[in-house]
Amino acid sequence: MVPLVFLIIIVTVTLYGVTAAPLARLLGLGGGAPDGVLILGAHRFGRDMARALEGFGVRVHLVDINRTSVNAAKRLKLPASLANAISPEFVEEYDEQGIGCLLALTPNDEVNTLGCLRYAERFGRDHVFQITPTDDDEAPNPEAIGPSHRGRLLFGQGVTLAALDARLQAGGRIHIVDLPLAADAVVPGPDAPRLFVITPERAVHFMTTDAQLPARGRLAYLGAAPPLADEAVEANLGTAAPAAPEPAGTT
């Protein structure tokens, strides 16, 4: 059962959304469709996602309450802020130009869910995503939070942040491959999480449990080391050894 405080926040955010979006349209503040990405969670996987997206020219912004993670992102020249991204003050004042999508990747399911609720009215329900929730035993539990109270679930059935971290600690890397796959292409394994596709129109298509893989584009997936050869984005990610585990932040 959703805790009472959590339920009150959901109702408050919903009521705010009913009036905020129409008011924005009335005032002509709707704007276009920016494709930049706000990422909640500047941990290793969040940073690798940001660097892969930047490699395709996608604007990114990492936010975390963990100073170690934020400093690590800044050392990589990634835009990063030390802040609570789901606080009402941050959400209300957030005006980063070109950002139109949310990836909630923190280890805290409630933070991810509230983040999606708070940003849905700004970016649209189709543009807020979160990692699959887990139960008390850290097992995937996509039904822990109802679909109307969360973002779209990322990276396929049962893919959790802990599973992604384990792959990275084992030497995994983000690989890029062209779609459709060439006859001599290295085919991603069935258990390799598909992360996103850059379409021929340069749009970002994040892979979710309810999305089909586009027929054409450039697919980013988290595969085993060593990285594929002759990939500009992977070269941009660098070849440093996996970093030591960081203290978990909740953004």
Image: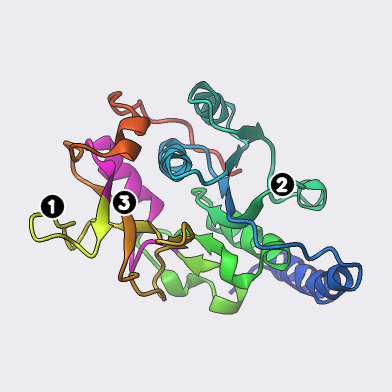
Distance Cα–Cα, label 3 vs label 2:
32 Å
Q: Position of residue 230 (x, y in %)?
A: 21, 37
- Is 79 in front, or is 10? 79
Distance Cα–Cα, label 2 vs label 1:
37 Å
Label 1's element? Answer: loop
Residue 138 seen in this snapshot: no
Q: Is residue 18 left or right of residue 175?
A: right
Location of residue 218 (image quadrant): bottom left
Q: Earlier in the sequence, mark 2 or mark 1?
A: 2
Density class for disc 3 (Cα within 10 Å; few <14, some 14-19, many ≥20) is some
Q: Position of residue 205 (x, y in %)?
A: 45, 63
Look at label 1 and name its amino acid.
Answer: Val
Label 3's element? Answer: helix
Density class for disc 1 (Cα within 10 Å; few <14, some 14-19, many ≥20) is few
Tell me: residue 171, above or below residue 216: above
Distance Cα–Cα, label 1 vs label 3:
22 Å
Look at label 2 and name its amino acid.
Answer: Gln
Residue 97 numbered tag:
2
- Residue drawn 53% across and 52% down? 108
Q: Quadrant of the N terminus?
A: bottom right
Residue 186 numbered tag:
1
Q: Earlier in the sequence, mark 3 or mark 2?
A: 2
Task: Mark 1 vs mark 3: give the one in front.
Answer: 1
Residue beneath disc 3: 163
Q: Which residues are magenta?
A: 154-176
Colour scheme employed for the rendering of this structure? rainbow
Q: Is residue 177 left or right of residue 1?
A: left
